[in-house]
Image: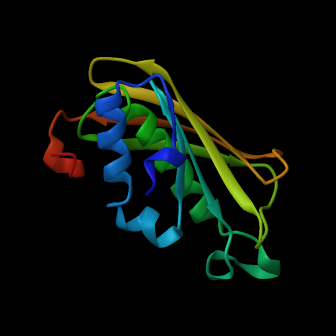
Amino acid sequence: MNKLEVVNKGLDETVFQIMCSRFGQIPTLKTLGANLIYLGLGEASMKLSVGHDYTTVKNRLHGGIIATLADSTMGWAVASLGRVGSVTTDMNLNYFSPVFEGSELISEAYVIHAGRTTVAAEANLYNTDRKLVAKARGTFYVTGNTTVTGAD
């Protein structure tokens, strides 16, 4: 991943560089062709182009792919706070509108509460026209163990 394409919205430059380099090592995101748009303290954004392989009937993006992008973006928002080894314990997702093949899905996530051992985050997911297509909320348990997520 070209780090120049990712916007740093206020993270320590060393942390930013480490996170950008790790992004390309995540098999799921690599398979989906997801791209990192920006990272900030407690916030992150990703996008993916909707290809045919991830659609269902009538060329609609599968809801599980939308959930994966939401979960991943929220997880990166949590990680931007330095919460190492965080894992998802709960996620709720509301779908509002379909996303179609040939368009882009954009996820913007932000931390809404950072406790000692759990962090809550939300993600808004938009189509190419910036129409809100889904909204997610997740809870992440902070293990403090970098080997859990491979962040060591």
Along the line of sight, which residue is nearer the eye, 13 or 54?
Answer: 13
Residue extending farthest front: 4
Q: Is residue 69 left or right of residue 140?
A: right
* Count of numbered circles on the image: 0
Residue visible at 36% across and 67% down in the picture: 27
Residue 57 % position (x, y): 77, 81
Residue visible at 24% across and 50% down in the picture: 149
Q: Is residue 148 left or right of residue 28?
A: left
The correct choice, above or below, for 6 with respect to 143 in the image is below
Q: Is residue 59 visible?
A: yes
Quadrant assignment for the N terminus: bottom left
Residue 111 % position (x, y): 49, 26
Residue 117 % position (x, y): 27, 24
Residue visible at 28% across and 18% down in the picture: 116
Q: Is residue 19 left or right of residue 108?
A: left
The quadrant holding residue 18 is: top left
Q: Is residue 67 left or right of residue 28?
A: right
What coloring was used for the rendering? rainbow
Along the line of sight, which residue is nearer the eye, 16 or 144?
Answer: 16
The correct choice, above or below, for 2 with respect to 33 in the image is above
The quadrant holding residue 88 is: top left
Residue 124 % position (x, y): 67, 39
The quadrant holding residue 81 is: top left
Q: Is residue 87 visible?
A: no
The correct choice, above or below, for 146 with respect to 128 in the image is above
